[in-house]
């Protein structure tokens, strides 16, 4: 199994991801990209420990380490882009409390792409990193990445109306940015769980609907226009409409994609093959083009650069606005949704009602022989999209079978216009998988 997963290194803090590993990972990035490296972390209990080790590793390799303290992942990424230096984020994003993670960021603000993580892993495993002479050990610097990030977002958006917004920071890093972004956009802001607490006493860091009862109630009680919740490192944002109803992340992705394509009268939208057909429907309808990638935000960003895409994102609340940053950005997502409400004069529930509805079923099956599965899928479905497993599209739905990159399982996604069609497609997926694994 590889050390680097879809978004860097993840594991249970002090067991699977130790201070020793963090030290070496600091050395790895400073060896690959010598000079200066910026480091930020989320609010997890283990984050300061791991950040300190990363900083020490960077300095021991002879680079200067810039400690940015606690910050949302996109704030560190925006700092990296602005200063053209690489970065490291200590965060396990949406994972449960006991986890932490270390993710590398490029000088352009994007996450490390797959091949860069592979190179990092080679340096890590071989321990062929630079160790500086005593006189060449790097300096420890400090800086702030919050102010520039917040003001860049606020400058992007101009609202004619005043909005009432409830924001659930979930005790993660967004407590530093999202309430402030909303205040500067002249909104009436109600913040919940807007203080740092690595025990995450209010809810899990992943903002799934069942964790957001308080937010939904608050939107209704305060008669708000919008509710928003972030994951632990605030690169993702999910929304609640003015009626206090959770909006599916896929519908939100489609809504934003539609807005971008309509605004630029065409253009390319990039999304993983696991995304709902509703995104493709609205993009094509508006005269745009959809490009599918493998699953994972780094590859979405990479393809967005290659294709000069106008917008990209995943169906989990991770939206990429390339004019601002080539990475998922929860703070910017709030600003863009408000801008959309402002320009259309419609309520969020009205806008979402215009998005086509599908039913999706997801599941997984044990699968050890991934190569065999992939070659069988290529043989049996030559016309499918093979960018990540096989996505087979039909008139009224689609089916995706893909082996997981990190676990010995294969995932099945089936989506149809009706629940019954989704179930049919899902069962077809199970049948294909069983045959392939015989
Ligand atoms: Mg995240």
Image (spheres, grey):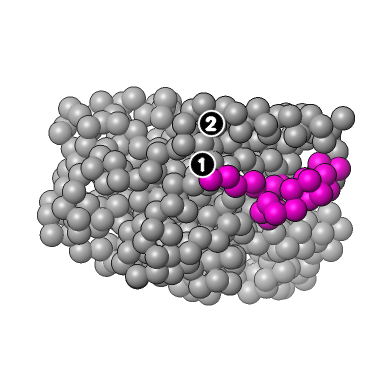
Which residue is label 1 attached to? Answer: 396
In the depicted view, which residue is nearer to us: 53 or 304? 304
Q: What percent of the width, then of the height, locates residue 345?
A: 16, 53
Image side of residue 147 versus residue 56, left or right:
left
Residue in the image at 76% along x and 59% along y: 118
Q: Quadrant of residue 213?
A: top left
Disc tally is 2
Q: Is residue 396 above or below residue 364?
A: below
Residue 145 appearing in the image: no
Residue on which the image places disc 2: 421
Residue at (73% x, 29% y) in the render: 431
Q: Residues within 10 Å of mark 2 (few under 14, many from 20)?
A: some
The residue under the point 13% across, 51% down is: 162
Is any atom of residue 334 visible in this view? yes
Q: Position of residue 427 (x, y in %)?
A: 65, 27
Residue furthest left in the image? 161
Per the model, the C-alpha gap separating discs 2 and 1 is 8 Å
Q: Is mark 2 within 8 Å of ligand 1?
A: no
Q: Earlier in the sequence, mark 2 or mark 1?
A: 1
- Say whether marks 2 and 1 touch (CB < 8 Å): yes
What span is colored magenta in the figure? 372-395
């Amino acid at each position: 199994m590889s050390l680097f997963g879809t978004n860097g290194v993840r594991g249970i803090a002090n067991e699977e991801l130790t201070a020793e590993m963090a030290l070496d990972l600091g050395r790895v990035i400073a060896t690959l990209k010598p000079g200066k490296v910026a480091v930020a972390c989320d609010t997890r209990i283990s984050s300061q420990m791991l950040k300190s080790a990363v900083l020490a590793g960077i300095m021991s390799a002879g680079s200067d380490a810039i400690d940015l303290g606690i910050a949302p992942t996109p704030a560190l990424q925006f700092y990296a882009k602005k200063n053209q230096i690489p970065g490291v984020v200590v965060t396990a994003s949406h994972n449960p409390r006991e986890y932490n993670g270390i993710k590398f960021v490029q000088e352009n603000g994007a996450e490390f792409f797959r091949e860069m993580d592979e190179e990092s892993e080679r340096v890590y495993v071989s321990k062929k990193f630079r160790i500086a002479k005593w006189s060449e050990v790097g300096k420890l610097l400090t800086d702030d990445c919050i102010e520039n990030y917040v003001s860049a977002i606020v400058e992007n958006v101009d609202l004619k109306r005043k909005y009432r917004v409830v924001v659930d920071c979930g005790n993660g890093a967004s407590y530093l940015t999202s309430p402030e972004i909303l205040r500067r956009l002249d909104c009436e802001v109600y913040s919940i769980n807007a203080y740092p607490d690595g025990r995450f006493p209010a809810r899990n860091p992943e903002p799934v609907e069942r964790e957001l009862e308080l937010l939904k109630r608050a939107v209704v009680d305060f008669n708000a226009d919008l509710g928003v919740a972030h994951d632990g490192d605030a690169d993702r944002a999910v929304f609640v409409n003015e009626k206090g109803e959770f909006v599916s992340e896929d519908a939100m992705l489609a809504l934003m994609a539609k807005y971008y394509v309509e605004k630029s009268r065409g253009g390319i939208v990039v999304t993983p093959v696991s995304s709902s057909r509703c995104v493709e429907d609205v993009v094509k309808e508006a005269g745009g083009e959809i490009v599918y990638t493998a699953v994972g935000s780094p590859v979405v960003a990479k393809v967005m650069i290659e294709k000069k895409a106008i917008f990209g994102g995943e169906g989990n609340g991770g939206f990429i606005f390339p004019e601002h940053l080539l990475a998922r950005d929860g703070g910017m997502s709030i600003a863009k949704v408000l801008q959309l409400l402002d320009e259309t004069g419609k309520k969020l529930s009205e806008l979402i009602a215009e998005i086509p509805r599908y039913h999706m079923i997801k599941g997984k099956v044990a699968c050890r022989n991934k190569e065999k599965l992939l070659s069988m899928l290529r043989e049996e479905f030559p016309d499918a999209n093979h960018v990540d497993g096989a996505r087979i599209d039909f008139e009224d739905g689609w089916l995706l079978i893909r082996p997981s990159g990190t676990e010995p399982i294969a995932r099945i996604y089936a989506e149809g216009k009706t629940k019954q069609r989704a179930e049919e497609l899902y069962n077809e997926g199970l049948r294909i998988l069983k045959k392939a694994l015989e």
